[in-house]
Image: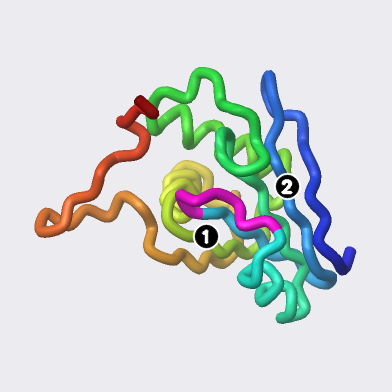
Amino acid sequence: MSGFAPATLQYRDGHVGLVELGVGEPIAYLHGMLGNPGDHAFLHALAATGRRVVAPSLPGFTGSSEPQGLRSLHDWVVATSELVDLAGIKGIPLVASSVGAMMALEVAAVRPEAFGDMVLIAPFGLWDPEDPVADPFATTLS
């Protein structure tokens, strides 16, 4: 598959988005807080390295339905682990940023076979007491 190909995968009681782009050996991408970039220059740059990029959307982010029952970090880790299998990215190299990098680290801690080599860009959750950040999983939309 050489072009941009958005897809939807059935997940629990809803769906998750999936973008595949390029040809060659697969590499996974887990997005940051702004969601899956879809047809974005960064994914095209990854594909230009001769790789097939597989970029699933976490539940509730771009292209995915709102998650039901994801109330704790443990719930998100389980959901991300399920997404690894559903998207077919188990054991392949991974690039992830922000919240995607955080989830990748959490999943890899309990399931080391989930990913191959990992490149993690600014994993969310690294705490700096001089510059604390809000916890997006503890906030509400209103």
Depicted 51 relative to depicted 104: above or below: below
Is residue 137 placed above or below 12 in the rendered structure? below
- Residue 27 in the image: state x and y as whole percent: 68, 65
Q: Residue under circle 1?
A: 96
Report if the CB atoms under discs 1 and 2 are less than 8 Å apart: no
Q: Relative to 104, does residue 94 appear above or below in the rendering?
A: below
Residue shown at 21% from the left, 53% from the top: 127
Residue type at mark 1? Answer: Ala
Q: Nearer the viewer, mark 1 or mark 2?
A: 2
Left or right: 59 in relation to 69:
right
- Residue at x 56%, y 34% (from the top left corner): 60
Q: Which residues are magenta?
A: 32-38
Is 33 within the magenta? yes
Residue located beneath label 2 in the image: 18
Residue pushed farthest front?
142
Measure how far apart labels 1 and 2 are at the Cα level. Answer: 15 Å
Q: How many tags in the picture?
A: 2
Q: Quadrant of the C terminus?
A: top left
Sequence-wise, the earlier of marks 1 and 2 is 2
129 horizontally vs 52: left or right: left
Q: Residue at image x 81%, y 69%?
A: 22
Label 1 crowd (10 A; few <14 / some 14-19 / many >=20): many
Where residue 10 sits, quadrant-wise, is top right
In depth, the one of 11 and 7 nearer the eye is: 7
Which element type, helix, strand or loop, lies under badge 1?
A: strand
Farthest residue to the bottom: give it: 49
x%, y% of residue 39? 71, 61
SS at mark 2? strand
Q: Which quarter of the rendered picture does the N terminus lie within?
A: bottom right
Amino acid type, label 2:
Leu
Residue extending furthest toward the right = 1
